Image: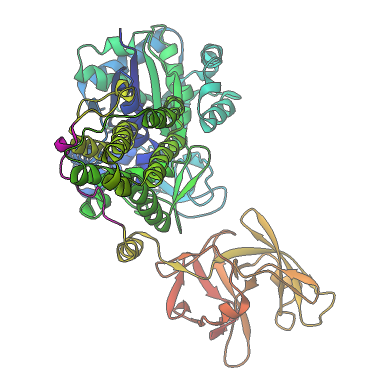
Amino acid sequence: MKKKVLVTSALPYVNNIPHLGNLIGSTLSADVFARHKRLQGCDVLYVCGADEHGTTTEIKAREEGITPQELCDKYGALHKNVYDWFGISLDVWGRTHTDTHARIVQEIFSELDSNGYILEQEVEQLYDEKAQQFLADRFVEGDCPHCGASGARGDQCDACQQLIIATQLVQPISKLTDTTPVIKKTTHLFLDLPALTPVVEQWLSPRVHTWSASAEAITKQWMQELKPRAITRDLSWGVDVPGMPGKVFYVWFDAPIGYISITAHAREDWKEWWHNPEVELVQFMGKDNVVFHSVIFPATLLGTGTHWNTVDTIAATDFLNLERGKFSKSRKTGVFAEDCIRYEKQLPADVWRYYLLSVRPESADSTFSFADFQAKTNNELIANLANLVHRTTHFAHTKLATQKGALTPTQEAFIAQTRRAYAHIHELLDAHHLREALKETMKVAKHANAHFQHQEPWKTVATDPERAAADIRALLTIVQDLSLLVQPFIPHTAQRIQELLGVDGLTYENLAGAYDKPFSELATPQPLFTKLDDDLRAQLEEEFLPKTHPLDLRVARITNAKNHPNADKLLVLTLEVGKESRQLVAGLKEHYTTEELVGKHIIIVYNLQPVKLRGELSQGMLLASEDESGTVGLLLADAPSGTQLCVGETQAQTEAVTFDEFLTHTITSSAEGVYIDETPLHGATITVDKHAFGRVR
């Protein structure tokens, strides 16, 4: 009987199009593994689908003026189109807003409740009196209680990354009616994780050490102090909670169950995949999703007392960042999947797949760079793999069509030596080290290219055509091998190579034999890819990279001020910049007393190259304005320390700037605002102390 392998990738929210960071973190990585296991001869079921419930869906539907159902229909179809284009080999694609899903979620909840793992607690929650409903976390915004930043959501502050309890928000505003909510008591249900801890620990012990490093670390940290976790929300869109009108299950309770319900909705044999202890379950996700799959979902299934297949391996990635910033769906920054489709003629799906897998963030965050994208496409994918395929098939097709090319012992030895690498590649794939497996696969192509050069068939074809044919037969055998080795990574390319060779339906079992077709049956060779030239790279950078400005301007709070020990006109200031402490030397002694300065929120050039001024280290420079009368006033910002300001629509660069480079920019202040090179500075309410409008220095 074939080994059953169940593969899932984190269910994507359908309120937006996935970006490349989403793809490499879940669906693309899962696809590589699923394809590899199929080639091994396993019975594979790769399941994914749209995560349709939760506040993000309701909010996005309101923004677009459509119902949540219409929103899910729209974006669910867009997601599936993206995955099809990228060659994601899903066996089952589904959605969580189905009767099947609701039934299974409610059944699992009922079993947990019967087993005593559901708690009912009275909690305080924000209530919108105008809308007459309690507000779920993301339906309320206000000022962060930790750092003071505005626009903090009821669950998290993006400015300081701290988790928030919605009732602690300062000046909260309902996103439903733009009114100020009140605090009222309500009842919610909680999963009793402390009671489930012994069961989860026993289940976790033999598994967690085999997971990716980030998955293991995150899970162990969470297991140190499990608390009851709310599983209900006050929403209209979701799975209804039995006996609690107006409440639905929290999306992170119902979404993981979606793996089960999506399978059940599509396949009659779904229990063979979810109740069969012989099935191996491997789940792929970004590290931000780990805890829900490593603790909460297993606890949910274990608590039912029914045998469910729980995850054997969590293959989690770290984050893929974008040069000059981060991939972000909410901010619409980065390269999104639909953008790749627009460039289909120049850059087919496998070009994107290859690069993403080559920088897969397996042990630490990695960066998507267009310069690196160009280099890897041209120097690895084209100059190595595509070059080997084209030169070998072209030579056989044009120079040796009438030759048989029987292998000699020398060429059989070359093939055997090359194939010693294959077992290690498969081991890496089995262990979910996809990036390293791809690297080792490309070494095979490099080795074969070197053999082509060493054998010089373009010379021997004239003097010893049988030897030349044997050399090419051996190389075509490796090309056939590579069509299998690269198939999990770049499947469209693998198919094209096999079409060139006139073979199909290959599995890893074919890695034992030799290429046995007559050279005359080779298809007319065509280049596999087109080079990514400088013009196209520049176009991509212009379209997708955030615009940067050399000056990194941030808000700093003065915590101490004292006279400079070696200069009469200088002061030494101690600054708080977010969580960082800095020292700065400023020529303010003639304009401010030390007492006046302490506590002020000023603006500094954060990335100015540090220097020593009369023996004291100065880490940056503050900004002050001087009017025509010679009055000097600090630029003040009504924002928490550490807040980064923006020049127009640009983002600040991270590289240090010298004082001379700073002087190339013209900064002015007026009653209307502060301008850098005639572009407004924003990101906080900025004022000029003493109304000293004029040139800023």
Looking at the picture, tell me which residue is in the foreground, 289 or 682.
289
Task: Using the image as rendered, state which of residue 439 and residue 275 is in the foreground.
Answer: 439
Image location of residue 29, percent across then percent down? 37, 34
Q: Nearer the viewer, residue 604 or 190?
A: 604
Q: Is residue 351 magenta?
A: no
Residue 371 x %, y %: 41, 58
Question: Of all residues shown, which one is farthest toward the bottom?
Answer: 629
Location of residue 9 (image quadrant): top left
Q: Magenta span: helix, strand or loop, mainly?
A: loop
Q: Quadrant for residue 35, please give it.
A: top left
Q: Quadrant of the C terminus?
A: bottom right
Res 584 visible: yes
Q: Which residues are magenta?
A: 518-531
Q: Is residue 524 magenta?
A: yes
Identify which residue is drawn at 31% across, 58% down.
Answer: 532
Give the quadrant of residue 281. top left
Q: Residue at x 53, y 17 (%)?
A: 204
In the drawing, does residue 692 fall left or right of residue 14? right
Q: In the image, is 180 to the left or to the right of 81? A: right
Quadrant assignment for the N terminus: top left
Above or below: residue 109 compared with residue 675: above
In the rendered view, tell whether residue 617 sits above or below residue 60: below
Q: Position of residue 372 (x, y in %)?
A: 42, 54
Q: Position of residue 612 (x, y in %)?
A: 75, 72
- Residue 550 in the figure: left or right of residue 602: left
